[in-house]
Image (cartoon, helix red, strand yellow):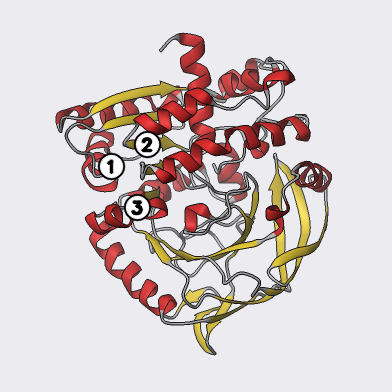
Amino acid sequence: MNRSLPTAALAVAMGLSLAACQRDDAATSDTAAAPADAASQSADQSPGAATDLEQLAERIVTQSAAVRDGDVVVITGRPHDAELMENIAVHAARVGAQPMILYSSDRLAKRLFFDVPAEYDSRPDELGMQMAGMADVFISLGNVTSESLFEGADPERLAARGKAGAGVGQEMMKNNVRRVEIGNNLYPTAWRAERFAMDMDALSKMFWDGVNLDYSTLQTRGEEVKAALAGGDEVHVTHPNGTDLRFRIGGRPVLVSDGVISADDMKQGGAAVSVYLPAGEVYTTPVAGSAEGKIVDTGTWFRGKPVEGLTLTVEGGKVTAMSGSGPGYADMQAAYDAVDDERKNLFAFFDLGINPNIALPADSKAGNWVQAGTVTLGTGANDWAGGDNTVPFGSTIYLPGSTVTLDGKTIVENGTLKL
């Protein structure tokens, strides 16, 4: 999976708006499925929310998105989160903004791919570009309830769609559209609960506890970690699974997702005006060509199928070899091969989690971005992290339990943040 601007969500929502007159990590290559059926319809049922949705909506509008009088606010998500989306719209209108809700569903996302002719895959997303030029704020819920929506999809078609829609995210970045994504690969779903070795109630509580963290405390912590990274250069990441990677970050911008788009963030613009909830990440991009070593993902999934021992060899800042096994590896390889842009191979980002309210069980089979001390590495797109790689493809590897040194000083030890 990978992260980018929320253009995938916008693309699906735009399809719905066209049909009814009314971007999970970005890549559509990781989020589509087979023709719609009864199972896909039931997947859109609400898992429930263990939080005060009215209070949350006000917080998202006034703090996270910094909505202002006159703003055009686009809100997207699935029907099972209708109450939260409607609350956000009301609170946006209460400060003088103009809200627009765009609904989608897992069923619709599937049909907009499988039931639409391939001849349109490469057509530029003109409506999405217009929306990216019109909106001041984009709030999306990363609440897709199925992990295998695009199972069986032609990887060449998915790559074509990703390429055709890439300009929307770039336009949003250029226009400093403020972006809030609620989910951050932790949204409570049955399949995530299984991956995290938790029941749904425990996952839901952890998710909303992470979302509702005191942002002022998180801002202070984020600035401390940011200052440390900004003052260093050589990073060395190791993990018991065999990961051993060195790269430099000296002079590269360091960004923080702390739950709030501040006045300083808005002055900076670009990637600085994005928030991912639950928040709690400090991230940066490498000096070009500096990364050397090996990244190993002990266990991951591709469209619901396990990939084992995924190993990326990195030389001169780019992936020169990839290997793996398991039922999902062939499909992952096919999706990778279908992208005809060599920028997909570039080592992209380094991310540190700082949220103390997110804690996965020791036997969790999956990772996340924000748990304090978690290290995440990735390849491909990194414009969301302040980089300049806009390729509509990438990989994200979570490495909880890592050890990290910065210029020889240990800043993460066996998954514990030392800063």
- Which residue is found at the position 25% from the left and 59% from the top? 264
Q: Which residue is mark 3?
A: 269
First in sequence: mark 2 vs mark 3: 2
Tell me where residue 73 appears, x and y as whole percent: 30, 31
Above/below status of 11 relative to 344: above
Dot 2, crowdedness within 10 Å: few (<14), some or many (≥20)? many
Q: Badge 1: how crowded within 10 Å, few (<14), some, or many (20+)?
A: many
Disc 1 vs disc 3: which is toward the camera?
3
- In front of the other: 220 or 16: 16
- The residue singled out by tag 2 in the image is 139
**Residue shown at 43% from the left, 25% from the top:** 80
How crowded pointer 3 is (Cα within 10 Å; few <14, some 14-19, many 20+) is rated as some
* Residue 419 x/y as whole percent: 40, 80
Mark 1 = which residue? 60
Residue at the spot 70% in from the left edge and 33% down from the top edge: 160
Which label lies toward us, 1 or 2?
Answer: 2
- Spatial CA distance of label 2 from label 3 is 17 Å
Label 3 residue SS = loop
In this rendering, is residue 57 above or below 273? above
Dot 3 amino acid type = Gly
